Image (cartoon, helix red, strand yellow):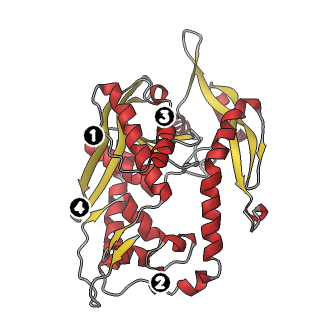
Amino acid sequence: MKFMNFDDDVKVISINNFSKSLFSRFNRCQREAWNLQRNYIEAEGLSLSIGKAAHEYFAQRVSKLIGNEYKPSLPYSPSILKEAKELAYSIDIERLTKNSEVLFIEKRVNATLPNKNNIIGIFDNVLYCEDEYMGDFIKVVDFKSGFSISREVDDEALIYGYLAAKEYKMPVVFARISGRSGDYWEHYFTYEEAMEYEDILNSYTEEVKKVLESPEAPFPNAGAHCQNCPFLDDCINKGYYEDNLDDMITQQALFAAKAKELKDKIKERTISEGGSIESDIYKTKLKESKTFKVQERLDNGKKKTVNKKAFIQLLFESGNIESILSSLDIKYNQDVLDKAEALGFEIGEGISRSIDIQVNAEEVSEDE
């Protein structure tokens, strides 16, 4: 890790370009984000290197579907490349791109907000999709190299949804997929929904700009991120973390060492077998939960699952929406199911299966 401090006088900066990574750093610790705007940093940990290399391999695989050979940039060691390639090749590309057309790989997009600030993003994959019920839409796929993925409409989903909607003037599905676990999550935005985020981004970039351009450094946030901060020596959080910093780094190293072992065991004991795995640090358990879906019987006798957004619209038109919208993501509780049946729909049932991975740090001995 290398960093170069500027003169004692605080550097005057102007920020007009914003990205999800800048917002992420700002939300994690405003002081770190403030310092990064004024210092040159050259640092890349093992997990970040593996993630970058895996993205390159993933882009290369998808590019073959459109006859456009993507040449990856891979300045990494053989061990990193081996793990990265395993992650990228664990994704079922054919299933991911089914009923869609690959438009772009590693697509850089830029949108100018009303306040003249720029939002910049890089889409791992851009797909054009056709659906008989949802119509045409753009799907933006974000490849993740970690075990888990966020299943929430967070800042990243909103930013990418907005950028894609503004770029293509179409509804957008933002999707995340994990190379380690195969987990997949997506969220559908109408064009109008995605564009509504523009006002929020407009005010949010002004807030971030004001803090990061100020000559006065903001107060730091304390957290696990401190162990990797290149500015910790000059931070008031140093004393707070001196006692447990070594333990935190040890745990991180143990996690990296055990990660591949765990992944291989999960492959051997698949979800369908219903097994669980126990080791020094990890415990895995199969979780099953009952799921429901609202279905419409077609003229040919087949059943078609009704999209949640479309069902919300039907509830709204029938005057049954006020009592059940407890969150933005409608839940199929008993009240909803009763109303669906009253409207003439059928209720389908299924089982959702997932593996719960728990880290048992207390069981790690000092000898390890």
- Residue 313's place in the image compared with 39, above or below, is above
Q: Which residue is mark 1?
A: 168
Which label is found at residue 89? Answer: 3
Nearest the viewer among 222 and 255 is: 255
How far is the residue under mark 1 from the one under mark 3?
Answer: 29 Å
Left or right? Give the position of 289 relative to 139.
right
Going by the picture, which residue comes out furthest to the bottom?
Answer: 8
Q: Earlier in the sequence, mark 1 or mark 3?
A: 3
- Residue 121's place in the image compared with 107, above or below, is below
Nearest the viewer among 132 and 261 is: 261
| Rendered residue at 43%/67% (across/down) | 25
Give the image location of residue 60, x and y in percent: 36, 35
Which label is found at residue 233? Answer: 2
Instruction: Tell me the crowding category of disc 3: few under 14, some 14 to 19, or many 20 or more residues within 10 angstroms, Cα based.
Output: some
Instruction: Tell me the crowding category of disc 2: few under 14, some 14 to 19, or many 20 or more residues within 10 angstroms, Cα based.
Output: few
Instruction: Tell me the crowding category of disc 1: few under 14, some 14 to 19, or many 20 or more residues within 10 angstroms, Cα based.
Output: few
Q: Which residue is mark 4?
A: 114
Q: Residues at badges 1 and 3 in contact (C-beta under 8 Å)?
A: no
Give the image location of residue 189, x and y in percent: 42, 43
